[in-house]
Amino acid sequence: MQDADKGPTTTLDGRDLRIGIVQARFNAPVTDKLAQTCVAELHALGVEAKHIKHVTVPGALEIPFALDVLADTDDYDALIALGCVIRGETYHFELVANQSGDGVMRVSLKHQVPVANAILTVENEAQAWARAEDKGRDAARVAVEMANLMEDLT
């Protein structure tokens, strides 16, 4: 079966999966919402609470380091990055957005573990709130789908 907008449909089964979540505390109200909806969706997909490791770091630039440490353990079927970078008046936004995204991708490729990237990079707080719930849910779904795909591919 195929959805015209999204390609082939996939049944998402999180039973027996182990998921690691790294959440930035910077912009905590938004990242807390990301985490809340992400964890709720993981549970809805069958991932047991005891199989979810949720850690926090100061900001988006620290996310890749913590992901790398988790990936080094080989204890996780997939990882999830949660953060929120809101544009300010300086170049710092570009630096944080680009470097955190690049770091997340490098961890995934280095360890051959799926990493769902839900580090929001937005113009303002209103955009962050408009995306937080859906992106938290999407990150959980991506993590489960990619973990299942890796199982099929290896």
Image: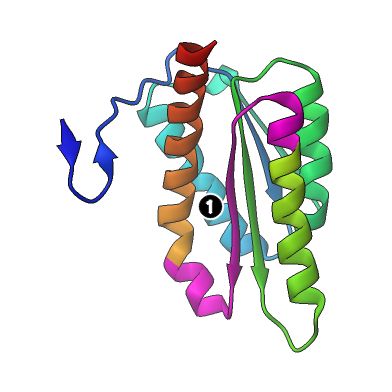
Above or below: residue 129 compared with residue 123:
above
Quarter of the picture containing the N terminus is top left
Q: Residue at x 80, y 85 (%)?
A: 90
Within the image, what quadrant is residue 84 found in? bottom right
Residue at image mark 1 = 34
Q: Find residue 38 and report its horizontal and vertical position in percent.
A: 49, 42
Q: Find residue 52 and report its horizontal and vertical position in percent.
A: 59, 25
Within the image, what quadrant is residue 76 found in? top right
What scheme was used to colour the molecule?
rainbow
Q: Residue at x 43, y 56 (%)?
A: 133
Q: Residue at x 73, y 62 (%)?
A: 98
- Answer with left or right where residue 115 lies relative to residue 47: right
Tell which residue pokes out farthest to the bottom in this image: 89
Q: Is residue 16 visible?
A: no
Above or below: residue 111 compared with residue 61:
above
- Answer with left or right where residue 135 lies relative to residue 109: left
Please rate how many residues cluster around mark 1, counting C-alpha atoms within 10 Å: few if below 14, some from 14 to 19, many from 20: many
Inspect the image, locate mark 1, and give the three-letter code of the amino acid beneath it.
Leu
Q: Is residue 32 visible?
A: yes
Q: Find residue 72 and report its horizontal and vertical position in percent.
A: 81, 22
- Answer with left or right where residue 61 lies relative to residue 28: right
Q: Find residue 106 and report its horizontal and vertical position in percent.
A: 75, 40
Residue 103 part of the magenta-drawn span: no
Q: What segment is highlighted magenta in the picture?
A: 107-130
- Say which element carries label 1: helix
